[in-house]
Image: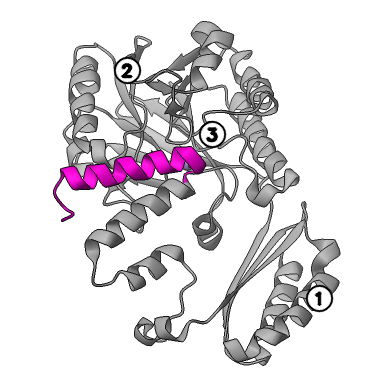
Amino acid sequence: MRIVHISDTHLGRREKGIREREEDVYEAFDEACEKARKLRPDLMIHSGDLFDTYRPTSYTLRKAIVSLRRIIDAGIPVVAIAGNHDIGPRFGGGKETPLSLLVEIFGDDFIHLNQNNPMFNTGDLVLCGLQYFPNQEGENLKKAIIERCDGAARRCRARWRILMLHQGVKPFLRDFKTEINKAFLDRTCFDYIALGHYHVRFHKRDGVTGKVFAYPGSLENLEEREVRQNVPKGFFVVDLEEGNINARFVEINSPRPYFLIKREVRRSSDLQLVLDSLSRRFKEIDLRKKPMVRIKLLVRQELLHMIDEFREDVHHEFGDRSLKILIEVSPVVESHLATLDGQISLNMEELMAHIFHDRPTELALALEIYHKYLEGKRGGDLSKEVLSLIKGWMDEDKVR
Ligand SMILES: [Mn+2]
């Protein structure tokens, strides 16, 4: 039995309003579907965040349908769960996800698993899956896994058992929010834990239980973390054979090259070093697509006047060869530098950790709000989330 495991495709994501970046996301998904089809799997599973928002545009929906048809028309059913990005509030209460539209379109060939419909059984294989549960619903998540997934799967006489979750699993992920522990999942009956949520490919076989935990990651560079770690993009093809699970990563070629340069500018020659390193990067690789260039500078006050000229130099030298050059400049705030031990950070989380270093409650809350923002929540949606986070904290009596 062969399964293709894909996740975090985020169709509709448009980085910094750049139209080509939205197309990059569709291209990556289409390539992945085409590669998956050629592998002739029995099933394709998607571990959440198929869409970037729960309200995709008609253009995004059409792109999703065209690519998914490649799989479904080849006789390969698709099983999906909703991630945090593709769940939203429903008009009149409850939760909404565009995955239900795909069920309307593809019928039995598109299976949407969630806590009300947590299991799909093909005889040899039983698949269980749940939608994303936020951190404050960790207990409900465990309950749903035990009662709706593990219990039901144990009662099936299947050879293989797969669990699909869109969650952060401790202790696999560093610097990332987790809602559930590996030790808890070790006690379930599942052989392969098909994870989504974390965008950098990760794969681990437990030496004792033989269970495989896998995050295929996203298909394009969606967040800075991914660019920094520079891990290939793609999906897993999982062969379930007698007594063995073999998960192999299949790389895709469409992701756009992404140059990210972060630097503290202490003297004027540091700006020249940025130009030099950019030149090197343009020479290094074969550029199928013009790269995205993002330069983040932390600049001393007395050097800020040089930035306009630097911008001109960069655009003059690399403008034609880049899709887009983004230069972000933050002035050094001297008072924030004192306790950073010479380590200058442009990372929002680290900066918050610094500002709230003696106020852990505020820090945790600030990070949660920031993560909601990163998840794409804005305006009314964001303020609703913030209010419910604060209420959650009050209820737990963490805040006085
Ligand atoms: Mn995601």
The circle on residue 118 is 2
Task: Identify the residue shown where x is 22% and y is 47%.
Answer: 393
Q: Nearer the viewer, mark 1 or mark 2?
A: 1
Task: Tell me which numbered mark, 2 or 3, is placed earlier along the sequence.
Answer: 3
Q: Residue at x 65, y 44 (%)?
A: 14
Scheme of image coloration = one colour
- Foreground residue, 361 or 172? 361
Amino acid type assigned to the residue bearing label 3 in the image? Thr
Residue 176: image x %, image y %?
Answer: 36, 53
Is ligand 1 within 8 Å of the beta carbon of the residue shown at mark 1?
Answer: no
Q: Report the predominant secondary structure element of the magenta stretch.
A: helix
Name of the residue lying farthest toward the top: 107
Q: Is residue 395 left or right of residue 62?
A: left
Residue type at mark 1: give it: Glu
Q: Which mark is residue 131?
A: none
Q: Which residue is mark 1?
A: 312
